[in-house]
Image (tube, helix red, strand yellow):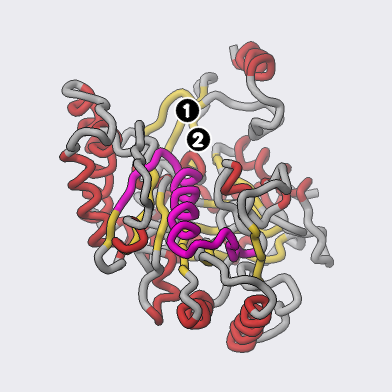
Amino acid sequence: MTDDLLGRHRGVLPDWLALYYEEPIEITHGEGRHVWDSAGNRYLDFFGGILTTMTAHALPEVTKAVSEQAGRIIHSSTLYLNRQMVELAERIAQLSGIPDARVFFTTSGTEANDTALLLATTFRRSNTILAMRNSYHGRSFGAVGITGNRAWSPTSLSPFQTLYVHGGVRTRGPYAALDDYDFVAACVDDLKDLLGHTRPPAALIAEPIQGVGGFTSPPDGLYAAFREVLHERGILWISDEVQTGWGRTGEHFWGWQAHGRGGPPDMLTFAKGIGNGMSIGGVVARAEIMNCLDANSISTFGGTQVTMAAGLANLTYLLEHDLQGNARRVGGMLIERLRAAAAHVPAVREVRGRGLMIGIELTRPGTDEAHPEAVAAVLEAARAGGLLIGKGGGHDTSALRIAPPLSLNVAEAEEGAAILEQALRSIP
């Protein structure tokens, strides 16, 4: 049946729609931190549908909320009052840290970032955008135009003039040899120099930890230093929290808080984990920015009753069970366990990340050269051992991506680390 489904997939879906594994699997159901495929194999899930199953598979509280809401009404559009949408917006606005916040719901992180770019360029009357090298912000025409990752950028055409700045990757690039203080100073100097050669940009958009780029990040405080420069010139800061939001990093609820010396961003975008698999994205912005549009706009599927019910139940569970604290505790233990294991594997260049957002960069032993064959081999070996993980990386990087549901317990973390250690040791 799997072979037949694969053939049908190839016969009707795009060639560029990637599948993991030499023999792709069909995931049929899940529970907690585990999923099962159509052949009955059970896996410990350390990728959560690309960081989307944030709390747990088949979480009873979310399942109940979705089922009960679906029995009443699923959808009515934003043309009608929607109690669930208002309630979730109120909670997110309060949690965002952005003063006088307004929330607009979308169906994905891509759409959220597109909306933030629309708001920024309209508010600032500029189509120039600052973005980070090695970044990823979605697959739409607009989002691709600001993505600094060649592997995920299929066209050079764009509605924006995009200028890429240094800083998203700490251990590579021209400033890698500097200490953290000098690294930040060099990146700020580069930003200032860049701004001296261009018309005033609308905004800087940045992921506090670059997701698709391989879970890379700058030293804490870089974006705070950037913001001082931006604020002097009226340039907005958009924090792309699609992967870093909701406590995944453990230390903070939002990724921007590691750079919060100068206060919150002007806008933040979110998606993925808040729906625990349901299609929710959104933008939070100061009212003057959110309300700058002078034409009608709606969202047909953004903020539907059933997705909002899921988001409310999921957020409540997350907060009541302190999953941010769990990510900090269990994630801290997991990253140290993986660092100890990686110390004996010559192909591992770096184990990085925080909370339950961990990257393992692989290179050809004794060099800084990317090793995509090793990443593919570890992915296959981990799956054979009963563990699902992800992969990523931008220019000259190959990384394993580890992001389990935030309810991961210590025993499961130990189990996953042991499987991953064996998979790393199998690198030829």
Residue 94 visible in the current orientation? yes
| Percent coordinates x, y for residue 148 in the rendering | 66, 57
Q: Is residue 294 left or right of residue 403?
A: left
Instruction: Residue at 37%, 41% (x, y): give it.
Output: 280
Disc 1 is placed on an element classified as strand
Instruction: Residue at 35%, 50% (x, y): give it.
Output: 407
Instruction: Tell me the CA gap for discs 2 and 1.
Output: 6 Å
Disc 2 is placed on an element classified as strand
Quadrant showing the N terminus: top right
| Percent coordinates x, y for residue 84 in the rendering | 19, 40
Q: Are marks 2 and 1 in contact (CB under 8 Å)?
A: yes
Q: Is residue 204 left or right of residue 93?
A: right
Which mark is drawn over residue 43?
A: 2
**Rendered view: 332 above or below 300:** below
Q: On the image, numbered disc 1 is attached to which residue? A: 36
Q: Is residue 306 left or right of residue 242?
A: left
Residue 331 visible in the current orientation? no
| Percent coordinates x, y for residue 215 in the rendering | 58, 59
**Rendered view: 381 above or below 122:** above
Specify the amino acid type for callout 2. Answer: Tyr
Residue interval drawn in magenta: 103-132
